[in-house]
Image: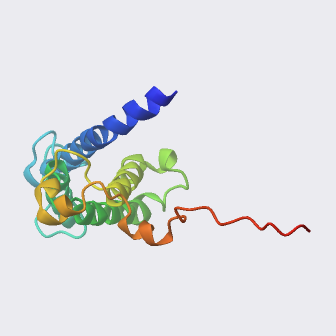
Amino acid sequence: MRWTRTWTGKAHPHVLALFRIVIGLLFACHGAASLFGVLGGAMGTHGGTVAAGAWPGWYAALIQLVGGLLVLVGFGTRIAALISSGSMAYAYFSVHAQHALWPIQNGGEPAAIYAWAFLLLVVTGPGAWSVDSLLPYEKEHAGQEHPEGAAIAAPATQPERSTVAS
């Protein structure tokens, strides 16, 4: 099974990038639908848009469009994903959770899935093929998954064993 770990290890940044691109595109489509009436328009408007400045719908749509596009191209991915995740958590708890406990019962599945998907991107980063990977800071730390982990890594040598008989 060593080949599986090798193959998945090599594919990891590319599959993560595909995940980021798809999630960002779908999220941006929600924002575009609500702001511009495209792709069927905002939910519940029969092809219309959300009123400009209306709380929280218009602001949520703006976060969806801008956050989705930033995640899609991988620019400021962690920050955009954090804001997007928070907006979906807010949507879930302020709109959906009051109707029923489970997302499948209250219509909040998309909000819950987006919240967790964006949280995953906050933790993992953008993967391959991102604008973030072109930035100097990211190039400098490329390949270092957890640079702070070096301070708590196990010692390179084994401690000597006691030769005193007990």
Q: Which of the 4 image quarters holds residue 14?
A: top left
Q: Which of the 4 image quarters holds residue 94?
A: bottom left
On the image, the x and y values in percent for residue 122 come to 33, 60
Q: In this orientation, which residue lies closer to the viewer: 89 or 101?
A: 89
Q: Is residue 146 left or right of residue 97?
A: left
On the image, the x and y values in percent for residue 38 come to 10, 43
Q: Is residue 160 left or right of residue 109?
A: right
Q: Is residue 57 left or right of residue 103?
A: left
On the image, the x and y values in percent for residue 25 come to 19, 44
Q: In this orientation, which residue lies closer to the viewer: 164 or 58?
A: 164
- Residue drawn at point x = 25 percent, y = 52 percent: 126
On the image, the x and y values in percent for residue 5 come to 45, 34
Q: In this orientation, which residue lies closer to the viewer: 122 or 162?
A: 162
Q: Is residue 166 left or right of residue 118?
A: right
- Residue drawn at point x = 18 percent, y = 68 percent: 54
Count of marks placed on residues:
0
Residue 90, compared with residue 129, is above or below; it is below
* Visible residue check, residue 132: yes
Residue 39, compared with residue 1, is above or below; it is below
* Visible residue check, residue 42: no
